[in-house]
Structures are given as structure tokens and as C-alpha cells.
Image (cartoon, rainbow, N blue to C red):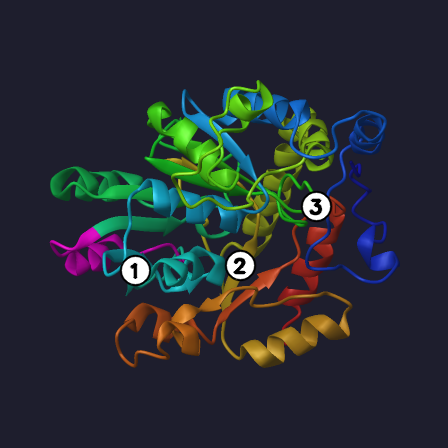
Amino acid sequence: MNKTTPANDLPIMATGEGIVLFHPHMPRNAKQYVCDVLDTRWIGQGPRVEQFENEFAEQFGGGCAPLAVGSGTDALHLAYLLADVKEDDEVIAPVFTCTATNIPFLYMGAKIRFADVEKDTLNIDTDHVRSLITPKTKAIVCVHYGGLPCNMDELHQMGREHGIQIIEDAAHALGATYKGKKVGEMSDFTMFSFQAIKHITTADGGMLLIKDRELLEKAKRLRWFGIDRSAKQMGIWENDIREIGYKYQMNDVAAAMGIAALEEFEETLALRKRLLQRYFDNLKGFDGVHCVGAGYTDREHAAWMMTVLVEDRARFQTYLRSHRIESGQVHYRNDRYSIFGGRQEGAFPNMDKIENNYLVLPLHTKMNEADVDYICDKIKMGW
């Protein structure tokens, strides 16, 4: 973990290749734990996966059942299956997200009804969600953009009123809270991602937290070809498969990295939150730059991304690059892609308004406060 350098020193990242947008975080014990696994008979799904599941659930699950998988996308697909989404069912999901949120619905033949964003948070607009609900709506999916939780009270109220399951894509939001509750303990299903640049990385991987613990055994079967692995390993499996399953398991090498990351997660999260708040403080009141997700007191930001809204984004991005500061859009409105049917003109007025203005700035554990000060100083010089 980097220590803060004096304000008059050069930023750590700017002294080398520049300040990169993302950087993987490798925990101190990750290499040793991986090497330990390589010396055992288990390198596939084995005891480390179960250990990681249990420790993760204890820290974030609030009584929900954990299922470790090969990617966040795997976890979402399993959540949609466990929510009993079927062909021609309607699902409401954000138009602005990583395509991984919505692509599994295409596997299943479900009909996606995209919801607009909130202009100030880029989270799903709950007023628009409510207008999209029909008798065919089976599930609502929300994404906590950048790490700021969505309006979960409204989403859960709609779920109760209409008998609709709520599924949280919390790929950005490990460590976030909403009104004192952890993201992971509130909804029917919550997915976390351990892709390379997330808070915790297992190189690639994911976790699904399931509120109804009775679904866990089915989830385990779906994770492994429809096979009851425990029964098979005990020699009592009757050698039949009754459910279509997948190869979605995590392996012990990846789980070892995850276990190491959990040991120092509070330290990792604290640094990211300090950096995000430093951005918010530095840019507060600066004309022409709006910090997305700043100022909320009823929820705690997980500080995965720092996003701003600016005019003349292309010029701004070029200006940052001239000072060796990376930036990018990262995610795009999903209705721009042919696989989702193409652009729906006028259907998402908030998305239309901000789609040419949002830009993600660097935020990761290879940075420190001096790096953020450097970036903000350059921004305040104008572009």
C-alpha cells in the first residue's frame, strides 16, 4: 500500500508512465498463498474455494449463502436462472452498464426493458423503473454505478408490491452500504466481480450471494454441469443429470488470491475512499466539473470509480492525456449495441443528456493523495 507523499513531491504514478486509469491490486500474501495451493493436490475447485466463500459471506453476506464462480457474468447468469427468469419473461435493467449485466438475458431469451439513469448518480432511475413494470416483469436488476448504492428502498418497495425479485449487480460496490446495511445482505441475489481491476481480484472471478439459502444446493449443481459434486466425491452419486448446468466454478488458485485480499480489504477500501473524497473536496464548487455520486449521507460509496461530468469531453480528455493522466468512458449505454436491438432514440432522456459528458478519472491503490492533487490541479488550470 502506498504511503502519502508530501504535497510538494511529485505524485508517485506521474513519475513513471503517468497516472493510469486502473491498476490491479495484489495483496501482500497473494503470491505465497497461490504457491501454497500449487504444492497441494487441489488446484481446481477444492477447499480454498469453500474457505473463500465462507470468509466472504461472513464479511459481506449478512446471512446470505455464498457461491464462488469463474466470473461476475457467471454469477449474474446463475442469479437469473435461480430467479426463474424464462424465455419471453420481461426483466428491467439499466441501459447504462457493462454489457455483462444484460448479455446473460440474451442466452435465456428474456426480454430486456431498459431503464434510464439518474443524472446525478448514473444509477438506475427508479421512477422510470416503476413505469416499466408489467404483469410479465420477472426481475429488476440494478447496478451500483462506480460504487454508490442505488435507491434500494424504492426498488425493494416495487419488488414487494409486484412480487418481483431484485438482483443487484454489485461489481463496483464491494464494501458499500445503504442506510447502514451492507451491499450483499439486502436483496434476493447480489453479484460481486473479482475481475482484474476490481477491489478484490482473483485474476477473474465472481461471487453470488443468495438470500434464500434453500437455493444454494441447486446453485452448486448449476455451477458444475448439473452434477451434485459432493455426492459424486462420496461415491453415492446415482450418475444422472436432471438440470442443464454450466462450467462456472472458481478454482483454488483464484480463491487463494481472494483469501489474501480479504485479509487486507479494510485497508484497501479505506485508501480508495480517501482518494475519492480527496477528489470530491478538491473539485467541490469548481465550475464546469460535476463529481458523480458526491454528497450522499445515507449511503457509503465503495469508491471503485471516480466519474465527472464535463462539457467538451474530447478536449478535456486530450488535455489530461497531455499531462500523462489516463481517462476513459469505461461503460456505454447498452442500446448502442446491435445485440440489444440498437439505439432507442428519445427513450432515455437522462442518458441522452449526459452520454457525451461523463468521464472516469484514475482511482486505484497504486495512487495516493498527491496523485489526486496533481490531477485536480491540472483540471483547475482549465482545458
Residue marked by disc 2: 307
Write the residue at 78% across / 68% down.
Answer: 324
The mark that comes first in sequence, 1 or 2, is 1
Crowding around mark 3 (Cα neighbors within 10 Å: few <14, some 14 to 19, many 20+) is some
The reply to whether dot 2 and dot 3 touch (C-beta < 8 Å) is no
Q: x, y (%) of residue 81?
A: 36, 45
Write the residue at 50% across / 32% down.
Answer: 67
Location of residue 82 (image quadrant):
top left
Q: Secondary structure at mark 1?
A: loop
Location of residue 340 (image quadrant):
bottom left
Within the magenta stretch, is there residue 129?
Answer: yes
Instruction: Name the amino acid, label 1.
Output: Ala
Residue marked by disc 1: 110
Q: Secondary structure at mark 2?
A: strand
Q: Which mark is residue 203?
A: 3
Instruction: Name the amino acid, label 3.
Output: Ala
Crowding around mark 2 (Cα neighbors within 10 Å: few <14, some 14 to 19, many 20+) is many
Q: Secondary structure at mark 3?
A: loop
281, 267: nearer the viewer: 267
Q: Specify the quadrant that holds the C terminus.
A: bottom right
